[in-house]
Image: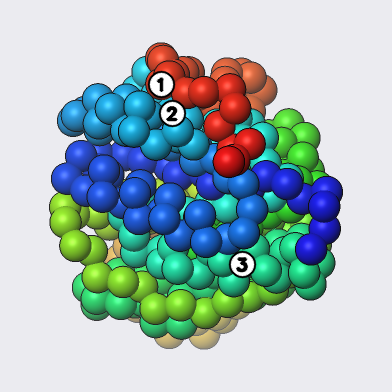
Amino acid sequence: MSDEKKLLSIVIPVFREEAHIRESLKVIASYAAKCGIDYELVAVDDGSPDNTWKILQELASEIKELRCIGFVRNFGKEAAIRAGLETARGDGVIVIDSDLQHPPELMPEMVRFWREEGYSVVNAKKAERGRESIINKLGAAVFYSFFNKLTGGHFKGSTDYKLLDREVVECYLSLKEHLMFFRGLIGWFGFKSKDIPFTVAKRTRGSSSWSVKSLFRLAIHAITSFSTLPLQLVTFTGILFSLAALGLGIQTIYNYITGKAESGFTTVILLILIIGSVLMISLGIIGKYISKIYDEIKGRPMYIVAQKGDYREDAGDGA
């Protein structure tokens, strides 16, 4: 083991998890203690409307390694991860969900790959997605297939459950962009990585805060953050319709000259509807990229911290 790697930080984004956050953090802490290295827990409450923050404050007095951050409002998981990474002091950082669907029992193995085998990134990937609706499974399959083709990566089964070496964390924090896609950026860096498969555990309490709408928005954000191909598709579609219009124009002139032209507006109406639909979709795609540029140049912070829980400065220095 390397003597230079003395502290492990575990970043835990939290949102509306009052039903089980107390149990979850204690379970995560118990497995962190088995990693053979001093550790700290960094819980980031993403503006939960329930009693999650109150419970985190209570836990901070029970778990000496726990550090807590609370947002003013909900800024999203990407912002919570960023805040956790900025707060983490460890030589290595694990990002894990608070609902225990990311199995914490993998952490000792992840730490071993990092400390003993020199991997800068250890990815926990879904071998099976567990109990999900058909819509969610189908949507995930379509998204990852499309995303992989756009970016040239291999993100099927990818999750935010990762161990990152301090060098990787610093690279991530050095990025100036505000609209970030964590799991995609870590893969984009290209550091030496190791994948560990896992099966998603059944959620014991509460329900997921991810709706179909929020997952769809995440997919659009991820795709537009990593590829400009949708913009190129707009141009390609325009070329196709120009060729089709040219062919149809030649046919129309020919029919007119030969006296075969038929009266009626069916073809015209259909063309107007099709072209109008394509134009609206194209404008929507272009508008999405413009809105991302607009959000970036405003330079607003990714999150605003409302309060921090009490923690000991020696947390993680171990006994």
Residue at horizontal 54 percent and vertical 27 percent from the top: 302
Residue flagged by tag 2: what amino acid is it?
A: Cys
| Residue 185 visible (yes or no) | no
Q: Give the image quarter of residue 123.
A: bottom right
Q: Earlier in the sequence, mark 2 or mark 3?
A: 2
Residue flagged by tag 3: what amino acid is it?
A: Met
Question: Quick one: 173 or 18, which is closer to the camera?
Answer: 18
Q: In the figure, is residue 220 to the left or right of 316?
A: left
In the picture of the structure, the residue carrying the numbered disc 2 is 68
How far apart in space, not on screen, are marks 2 and 1 (Cα)?
Answer: 5 Å
Residue at horizontal 58 percent and vertical 52 percent from the top: 94
Residue at horizontal 39 percent and vertical 36 percent from the top: 63
In the picture of the structure, the residue carrying the numbered disc 1 is 309
Could you tell me which secondary element the residue under label 2 belongs to? strand
Residue at horizontal 57 percent and vertical 18 percent from the top: 300
| Residue 20 visible (yes or no) | yes
Would you say the residues marked 2 and 1 are in contact, meaning their CB atoms lie under 8 Å apart? Answer: yes
In what quadrant of the picture does the C terminus appear? Answer: top right
How far apart in space, not on screen, are marks 2 and 3 (Cα)?
Answer: 24 Å
Residue flagged by tag 1: what amino acid is it?
A: Gly
Task: Return the x and y of residue 60 as percentages of the image width and height.
Answer: 37, 29
Q: Earlier in the sequence, mark 1 or mark 3?
A: 3
Mark 2 Cα-neighbour bin, 10 Å: few <14, some 14–19, many ≥20: many
Mark 1 Cα-neighbour bin, 10 Å: few <14, some 14–19, many ≥20: some
Would you say the residues marked 1 and 3 are in contact, meaning their CB atoms lie under 8 Å apart? Answer: no
In the picture of the structure, the residue carrying the numbered disc 3 is 110
Q: Give the image quarter of residue 261.
A: bottom left
How far apart in space, not on screen, are marks 1 and 3 (Cα)?
Answer: 28 Å
